[in-house]
Image (cartoon, helix red, strand yellow):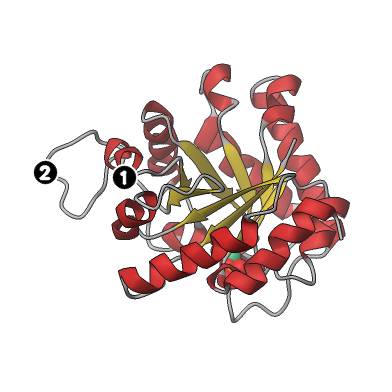
Amino acid sequence: MKKLIVGNWKMNPQTTRDAVKLFKDVVREARTITKASVAVCAPDMYLNPLAALKEKKVSLGAQDLFWEKEGAFTGEASGAMIANSGAKMVIVGHSERRARGESDEDIARKVKAALAAKLIPILCVGERERAGEGEHISFVTAQLTAALKGLPRVDASHVVVAYEPIWAIGKQAKRSATKEEGLEMAIVIRRTLAHLFTRPVAESIPILYGGSVDEKNAKDFLFDAGMDGLLVGRASLSAKTFGGIVRTANTGI
Ligand code: 13P
């Protein structure tokens, strides 16, 4: 499968003008890319103006959705709203949202709502810390099971999973995961997906790595850690750095 490189802009940038500029710069960086798919998950209010640029090379995504279809839910955005704003995908269960109270049940509902709106859910999983022997394995397996159990196989094949070890995310992270740690979790996630669905379905689900990815370590995760792509935070806010990561995915160097 083609490598999938997704930028998660989080709560950046602060103006539509800056969002349009960053997006156009990313499109320019991605222009010659043929062997990787590129997407950017932007704040909701930038989706319409970015979609209006009608760029084909870089897909758009949102960073969250609500599971209800419509009604009295102040501040929420439905799957249909997001899809109608030009997004093709949506991040679900990011650790920064889980940390603010999102539960496994909420996340399972959001996965279903995304699929119902024909959006690809990018389901984020990952342990807070590496504590005892193998605890991270049972933790991530439980997160995947809670979010995906009971999903019809046809739906499951439209899901993307992102492994984001919380201890490796953000400015305060002491280090990124190693490629060995990534490989172990790619195997654990694939095995869990095969158990929940079937092996062919599990093999069709892209597994991304996210957690302090930069131009230096992108290659390790893409080509030595069994990952099908990357979910990039800070480094996606520089078109040049993000472009470098995308080129690595495209060429393998
Ligand atoms: P950083 O790449 O900034 O560590 O963020 C990772 C992340 O949370 C992507 O969703």
- Residue 156 coordinates in the image, percent (x, y): 57, 26
- Tell me: is circle 2 under 8 Å from ligand 1: no
Residue visible at 76% across and 63% down? 218
- Locate the C terminus by quadrant: bottom right
Which amino acid type is shown beneath numbered disc 1? Ser
- Tell me: is circle 1 under 8 Å from ligand 1: no
Q: Which residue is mark 1?
A: 85
Front disc: 1 or 2: 1
Disc marking residue 72:
2
Which amino acid type is shown beneath numbered disc 2? Ala
- Residue 39 coordinates in the image, percent (x, y): 55, 51
User: In the image, is residue 86 above or below residue 46?
Assistant: above
Visible in this render: residue 133?
no
Visible in this render: residue 250?
yes
Residue visible at 43% across and 30% down? 115
Q: Residues within 10 Å of mark 2 (few under 14, many from 20)?
A: few
Examine the image and state in which quarter residue 166 appears: bottom right
- Residue 85 coordinates in the image, percent (x, y): 31, 45
* Quadrant containing ligand 1: bottom right
- Is residue 53 found left or right of 132 in the rendered image? left
